[in-house]
Image (cartoon, rainbow, N blue to C red):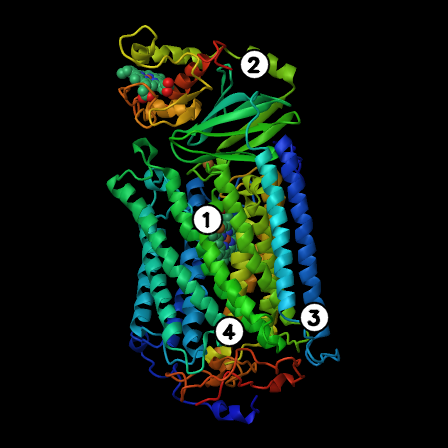
Amino acid sequence: MTDMTAESGLTAPRSDTYLNHGSTLWSWLTTTDHKRIALLYFGSITLFFFIGGAAATMIRLELISPNGALFTNDGYNRLFTLHGVIMVWFFLVPSIPTTFGNFLLPLMIGASDVAFPRLNLFSWYLNTVGGLLVVACLVLGGVDTGWTFYTPFSSMFSNSYVFLAVAAVFVVGFSTIATGVNFIVTVHALRAPGMTWFRLPLFVWTQYATAIVIILATPVLAISLALIAAERLFGLPIFDPQHGGDPVLFQHLFWFYSHPAVYIMILPAFGVVSELIACFSRRQVFGYTAMVWAILGISVIGFFVWGHHMFVAGMSPFAALVFSFLSFIVAVPSAIKVFNWTFTLYRGQIYFEAPMLYALGFIGLFTIGGLTGLFTASLPIDVHVTDSYFVVAHFHYVMVGGSVSAFFGALHFWWPKISGRMAPDGWARFAAILMFFGFNFTFFPQFVMGYLGMNRRYHHYAPEFQIYHVASSMGAVILAAAYLLPMGYLTWSLFRGQKARANPWGATGLEWQTSSPPPKHNFDQRPVVTERAYVYHPDQESPRHEEPNAREPHNPQGQRG
Amino acid sequence: MSGSPIFWLPAASTEGARTDHLFFLLCGISTLIVLLVLTLIVTFAIRYRHGSAAPRGRLPEFFRSEFEIGWTAATAFLFLFIFWWASAAQLAGYAPPPDAIEMHVTAKQWMFKTQQPNGAREINQLHMPVDTPVRLVMTSQDVIHSFWVPAFRFKRDILPGRVTQGWFQATRTGTFHLFCAEYCGTDHSEMGGEVIVMPKADYAAWTAAQPEGDDLGKAGGKLFVKMGCAGCHAGSNAVHAPNLAGLWGRTIPLADGSSVEVDERYVRDSILQPRREIAAGYEPIMPSFQGVASEADLTRLVAYIRSLATGEDAGQ
Ligand code: HEM
Ligand SMILES: [Cu+2]
Ligand SMILES: [Cu+2]
């Protein structure tokens, strides 16, 4: 541990940060700096989060009445399809990797950029092309297949812009693959001297595992989408049973991608939460090695459970048992992670700033999301609840309660590093608490109505479910407020926020060993790593008390230079 | 149904009761785990808030891999136990009882057409007797649909070009929601109806009162002649083709040395893809009726061939 003065050299405002390294629009659009590309991505995913959110708002508005009449049946179908397509592929899959991953991965391993900076920029352009295609699809009239594109509906029966939507997802998939390739090579090739694999922060491990899952799974998505296009445009009989095709084949292909994809969406969140919990309880992550193996275990086993989405689609009882079994197995590492996070708090010196509140909220919501996964992995229960609101609630707990909370936690934690300003903590804590309660208010009723028989993707529904829908829509108002608030106070902080020190939270990661915001080349001198991650306190000793504003900067991952 | 309960939907089938037990068991376990995690977090958060007086001291030695191994093993055992329970329940209810009565369901955008064993047809309704196992034989004419009766905790997808089956046994009389659970286009949310479970006597009376309808098997018999099947298959014929009487339900040898049970699937495949499984001792000369026989025709032909099994009527 070094003392406070070591940091002071970094506290002085510097003029050569990555932000003011060039200020023309052109300098941004042609940048190969991973930090600037991260900001470009911030722009894209924020835009899509709000488009998807607008669709969600309209869905919830329409569902207040069992006979909602704001939209036609077709209109409603297009609405939830767009919501799903945009939220999954244009917000959640890219969210943490392309923003925080891009920004932090090189910093955390002590590199000056990713391995292929131009490929990185190219991936953002691909993402933008995909985004334009999906917006074109939206403007022309949308698509009504559900984000799952099930055949033969999507390939032969739908009268909407299926091809545009499929093309959009196809293109954005390649953008994700490019990011994945980049991350894998970066972690392998660019680690600072002394940064061995088992010294990597868990955030880096999760980015690495996510990247591997991305490059193995996404091509399968591309193939299945291309097959839909082939059948739709050229009449190639692939899924059409009239000509010997098999409609269920599509589901196998789709879920072979899409189950791993849920891990693409949640693993980065695991990484974020590990960083946050450790930093704000001033403790080493409990069971670091177990955490690493859990991450890797999830990524591997996650490839073999896709069939649990198809238990009622005509599957042999033996296959169903195998998929059910593997689904229980894949839940074990997730449970271990929850226990490890919890025990990281034990004997800590816990601070409750906004990032920590988001992280604790994540644990709560992810635990509920994960446990309801055990329900859907149990055959007789899944037969009943699949395609009901129970499932809608389950995946929202994981993907929105879990990943989106983690995203906001990350945003508040690394905001000082990214922007050079502190976010107003009072407002941020208020938003975090609002988000937690708004979320539960919105989605918990959906478990109940799902079990009672409320169908997923229903525009009109039986009157006995109305009470649950009204509750859910009321919760959604709170949730929407909680999502909008940070837009306001974070923007405010850019101009009025307190200037951030290099390491305002006294965290251990290398990204805190450079100024806030970092210079273009990240480190003035290449860091040399001498210790494990998260040495917030000497081994076997508990963390000591530190004054809140003088948390020790902890320089354990090595000396600068 | 108007007047349906809002806060709980009691199970109305044998399987449903089993599913509910498992569901409550899982609710119990989950609540305990959530409470455990919550208590730990809140306790730690309060006790170890920064600057609190709680003693921290040296971290105990056992606080390492023993813990890790301990709760890994505990969760693994717990999960395996749930898996075992769930799968046992599933397998126990997998095969339909042999005496189940058979109902046919044909789904299309956006309706369910059902047919009783005696041929009586309904749309978006299914009448059935209580305390009697009912087996559904389902197929779709267009996209994928799904037959969901929440009160029975029963759901099965209905696929085009394929037959799916499922069964349930109602334990209460009443009218229950039937929903299409798989998204199928514009009016997906309007596609549904009701399952009407009646006392056995009432059901018998109801059936008797239905217009005779075209008895499936009899209609199939006419088709058998009209489509030229009889030209080969009717016993006294020059062409060497198997006699189909008494075939249903038997296990017969195939040309490739394997054997197969003659059931709905086998008969349909024999008609649509006769080259796939060839009965031992015959030349593969039977033409495929793919694209010639419609879904409805197939259902009738199958019913006819089944009725040849014992000479009983098509309803079994
Ligand atoms: C912000 C508040 C949100 C609300 C109120 C909301 C609401 C809903 C509702 C009501 C549905 C069900 C539509 C149906 O099946 O009938 C749905 C589906 C879905 N939502 Fe959200 N959602 C929200 C945020 C998100 C976010 C952030 C994501 C990103 C991960 C997301 C991902 C999905 C997905 C993947 C589906 C399934 C779509 C489908 O079945 O086609 N949602 N959402
Ligand atoms: Cu899955
Ligand atoms: Cu439907």
Looking at the rendered image, the disc whose residue lies closer to the viewer, 3 or 1, is 1
Pointer 4 local density, CA inside 10 Å: few below 14, some 14–19, many at least 20: many
Residue shown at the point (66%, 27%) measured from the top left: B171
Left or right side of A352 for A383: left
Mark 2 chain: B
Mark 1 Cβ and ligand 2 under 8 Å apart = yes
Q: Are marks 3 and 4 on the same chain?
A: no
Image x and y of residue B131, in percent: 64, 23
| Residue topped by disc 4 | A490
Q: Are marks 2 and 4 on the same chain?
A: no
Which of marks 1 and 4 precedes in the sequence?
A: 1
Mark 1 chain: A
| Residue topped by disc 2 | B207
Image x and y of residue A32, in percent: 32, 75
Please tell me whether mark 3 sits on a helix, a strand or a loop: helix
Looking at the rendered image, the disc whose residue lies closer to the viewer, 4 or 1, is 1
Pointer 1 local density, CA inside 10 Å: few below 14, some 14–19, many at least 20: many
- What's the mark number on residue A79? none
Please tell me whether mark 4 sits on a helix, a strand or a loop: helix
Q: Are marks 4 and 1 on the same chain?
A: yes
Looking at the image, do the residues carrying marks 2 and 3 touch, with CB atoms under 8 Å apart? no
